Amino acid sequence: MDTLTLAHHFLIAMPGMTDPLFTKSIVYVCEHGEQGTMGMIINKPSGIVLAQLLEQIDLPLGNEHANTVPVLFGGPVQPDRGFVLHRPIGNWQSTLTVTDDVALTTSKDILKAVSEAQGPQQLLVSLGYAGWEKGQLEAEIAANQWLTVAAEEWVLFDTVCEARYDSAIKLLGFDPALLCAEAGHA
């Protein structure tokens, strides 16, 4: 029997989410398996842009586009470390392949390529990630803290940060105003 994987899915925070780090969050799940779950919050800007991050790690800026790319707050785990969600996959030193077209890279070589305008065509950069121990996310889903829906790459790469939450909710196929903070139990 195949095990259910939530990789390449969005986690949509329910209205009753009490953790302020995850309120109104969309998490893109990069890995879900025996070791737990790893994802990136894709709709919370950190307050800095990519050009500032590149400057902080002493990479020269040869890519003016980096002045407009927001760096995201990807989650509370390792908030001092950069994570790059991108397509196409390419060939980088430390990459987790999520789908045939999307990958998560943590090595500095990808940021060097971006600074030289030679990186992936589409990317999201975050500081930190969201992580759950084995079974923890499943318990949170059962407690009505998250909705799940298959991810669409256009939400990741073609939708502005501020519109990703509403775009992901629309993938569910119902009016989000109908969501209730409380789960019913029989």
Image (cartoon, grey):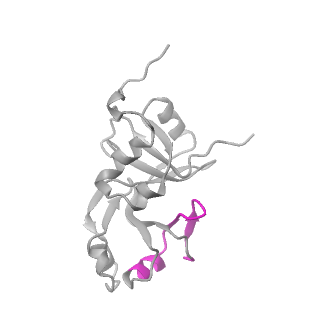
Please give left or right for residue 107 compared with residue 45 in the image. right
Question: Which residue is found at the position 25% from the left and 66% from the top?
Answer: 48
Q: Residue at x 44, y 57 (%)?
A: 154
Q: Which residues are magenta?
A: 91-114
Kindly tell me whether residue 82 is visible in this rendering: no
Residue farthest toward the right in the current orientation of the protein: 1
Q: Is residue 135 left or right of residue 10?
A: right
Where in the figure is residue 172, as x and y percent of width and height?
45, 38
- Establish if 175 lies above or below 80: above
Q: Is residue 31 above or below residue 105?
A: above
| Residue 40 point in image, percent of width and height | 43, 55
Residue drawn 61% across and 46% down? 5
- Vertical comparison of 83 with 64: above or below: above
Regarding residue 110, the answer to whether it shows in the image is yes
Q: Quadrant of residue 108?
A: bottom left
Q: Position of residue 70 (x, y in %)?
A: 30, 65
Q: Nearer the viewer, residue 90 or 166?
A: 166
Residue 23 occupies which quadrant of the picture? top left
